[in-house]
Image: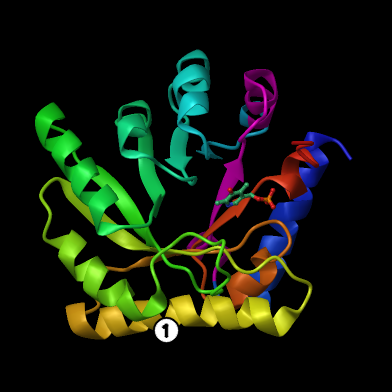
Amino acid sequence: MTLTDSIKDVKNKINDACKRCGRGSDEVTLIAVTKTLPAELIKQAYQTGLRIFGESRPQEVRDKTPILPQNIEWHFIGPLQTNKIKYVLPVCRLIHSVDSLHLAKSISDFCERKYISANILLEVNTSSELSKIGVPPAEAREIFNKIRLLPNINILGLMTIAPFTDVEEDIRYSFRRLAKIKEELHSEMGRDQRLELSMGMSHDFEIAIEEGSTMIRIGTSIFGPRGR
Ligand SMILES: *Cc1c(COP(=O)(O)O)cnc(C)c1O
């Protein structure tokens, strides 16, 4: 399949999933995940019309973004150490992977020094696998509310990575846990701030859409296997 065909295929699947659950396809933002991919390939995807790309390694953000079109909207979706914040901000429009109050404070401090602000999501571990990053669901609301009080940070919603499994119920359960935390936050905060749910990857984005995802992060289904 060509790049154009695979993008069309993903978009069709998004539309179908939205239809199945009575949502508008404009409620779901597609983020094309380009970690490990060369700038040349990202440029090809850009030329098909994609504008939102996700990277998961700070050094790749540093190296690739200056040589690609300036109107790309970059999202950061990977593990972030505090000493790498400088590579990710202010290039990235949204950081999906803030997984501690400590990291949020460091981002806030960095932004204050640079007179900028950051948009972030709180990453929640909804799959309770020991290897997974993210705050425990039971602590998510408390940490979310503490981050809301930090200067120069806009916390816009939640993100999760479902367990890597073919057992659909396990994936669905993981997404439902995140959607439930969002509902609880909405009832605390009121609904004027529409919270984002970043959930769904190549192997599970249709389930994620059915469970209320507003941002899906797709690499393999667009670009093929990464090979590392
Ligand atoms: C790599 C990555 C993705 C994309 O995964 P695919 O299975 O290739 O679609 C999405 N989210 C995060 C956090 C990732 O690291």
Q: Is residue 211 visible?
A: no
The residue shown at (80%, 41%) is 224
Q: Quadrant of residue 10?
A: bottom right
Indicate yes or no whether the magenta region holds residue 80: no
Residue 99's x, y, as percent? 37, 57
Placement of 25 over or under 150, stated as above or below = below
Residue 155's x, y, as percent? 26, 58
The residue shown at (50%, 74%) is 126
Residue 67's x, y, as percent? 51, 13
Indicate yes or no whether the magenta region holds residue 29: yes
Tell me the magenta residue range: 24-45
- Amino acid type of disc 1? Lys
Q: Quadrant of residue 167?
A: bottom right
Residue 212's x, y, as percent? 51, 75
For the C terminus, the image quarter is top right
Q: Which residue is mark 1?
A: 180
In this rendered view, identify the residue nearer to me: 216 or 149: 149
Q: Residues within 10 Å of mark 1 (few under 14, many from 20)?
A: few
In the image, taking residue 176 as reference, residue 32 lies left or right, namely: right
The residue shown at (63%, 80%) is 172
